[in-house]
Image (tube, rainbow, N blue to C red):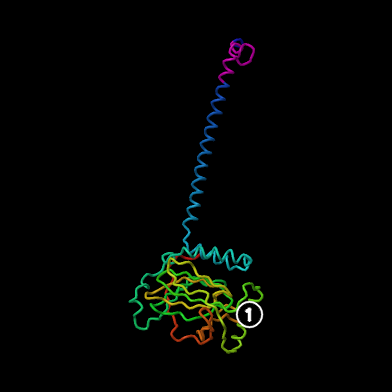
Amino acid sequence: MKDCLKRSNGMDGKMTFVDSFALLSCRIISTFFKRQNLLCASASNFHMDNKDEAKSNMEIVNIPPIISTYRQALHTFDEKFKSDISTNLNKLKRMMDNLKADDLGFDQNLNNPSAWKRPNKAPCTYIEVFQNSLVNMSIFVLKPGFKMPLHDHPHMHGLLKVISGAVRIRSFTEYPLKEVASTIDFAARAKHEAARIAQGIHKRRRLFAEVSQDNICQANSETCVLTPTISNYHEIEALNMPAAFFDILSPPYDTLIQDVGPRRCRYYYVANEISTNVVELQETNVPECFYCDQAPYLGPMLI
């Protein structure tokens, strides 16, 4: 029996050449299949990663334009980023340049001239899109031929994009104006004016202003921009059809200026034309012809 075992193990208890070769072959084949499995798993993971990346890119592409605009507006006017206001404002303007009426869920029934002939219909419809203490986003719709009265935007930035119809926009810049002025100067002037109004001092303002814009704007026109000192006064007139524009203001009207009071909108008329592009503006009461009804915002939820 022992002799038989010795013979089967190579007579001396060691593996024969044939046995060693067979064992080595098994190990090589086993290693090959393991590597194949690893390669398949890696390929599968790579495929899944590509699908996830494509899905992520698709989600970015599919963000509604008004949501991207809303997020950029919050970023642009955030106090933390005020040092980059010029860059961010330009980016916001470019985004608004591409906005369409459908992006805002605009009710095309408001484009029907007959809708504005109903008894007691206000000459202007206001649609609030979003508002907080930092930003107001809204849509104004004007009846054919109606002019939104000349008004100001005290120490505010604003962007206006026509989304339907056509309007004539005439804007004014207080004159004379230094091109370079510090933020402190702006704040001091705004506080002075707000304090005067908050204290009930109703000596009407009278100022010289330069015509900074007098253009017809349509849905394919660029966004109009106003700043605390440039084109801060304007009037907007619908032409022969209803017209709508999307508006972003920061800070909103009626927000508080610290230690002063609420930021009020004031109205003006051209009291005197000094030259072809310089006029004298006189503050006045809110024109009785200007009042609004309201309609709901029907666009994407802003998140």
Residue wearing tag 1: 189
Q: Nearer the viewer, residue 76 or 49?
A: 76
User: Is residue 21 inside the magenta stretch?
Assistant: yes
Q: Amino acid at mark 1?
A: Arg
Task: Tell me the SS state at disc 1.
Answer: helix
Q: Residue at x 51, y 71 (%)?
A: 248
Tell how many labels: 1
Q: Nearer the viewer, residue 64 or 116?
A: 116
Q: Position of residue 86 (x, y in %)?
A: 59, 66
**Above or below, comparing residue 23 to residue 200 in the picture:** above
Q: Position of residue 154 (x, y in %)?
A: 57, 78
Q: Residue at x 36, y 78 (%)?
A: 116
- Considering every residue shown, the one lying at the far top of the view is 3
Task: Tell me, yes or no, if residue 17 can be seen here.
Answer: yes
User: Is residue 200 inside the magenta stretch?
Assistant: no
Crowdedness near tag 1: few (<14), some (14–19) or many (≥20) residues, C-alpha within 10 Å:
some
Q: Quadrant of residue 175?
A: bottom right
In which quadrant will I find the N terminus?
A: top right
Q: Position of residue 96 (x, y in %)?
A: 49, 65
Q: Quadrant of residue 153?
A: bottom right
Q: Nearer the viewer, residue 278 or 31?
A: 278
**Above or below, comparing residue 288 to residue 172 in the picture:** below
Q: Nearer the viewer, residue 251 or 1?
A: 251
Whether residue 80 sits left or right of residue 274 in the image: it is: right
- Considering every residue shown, the one lying at the far left of the view is 114
Q: Position of residue 227 (x, y in %)?
A: 57, 73
Task: Tell me, yes or no, if residue 250 can be seen here.
Answer: no
> Which segment is the magenta one?
4-22
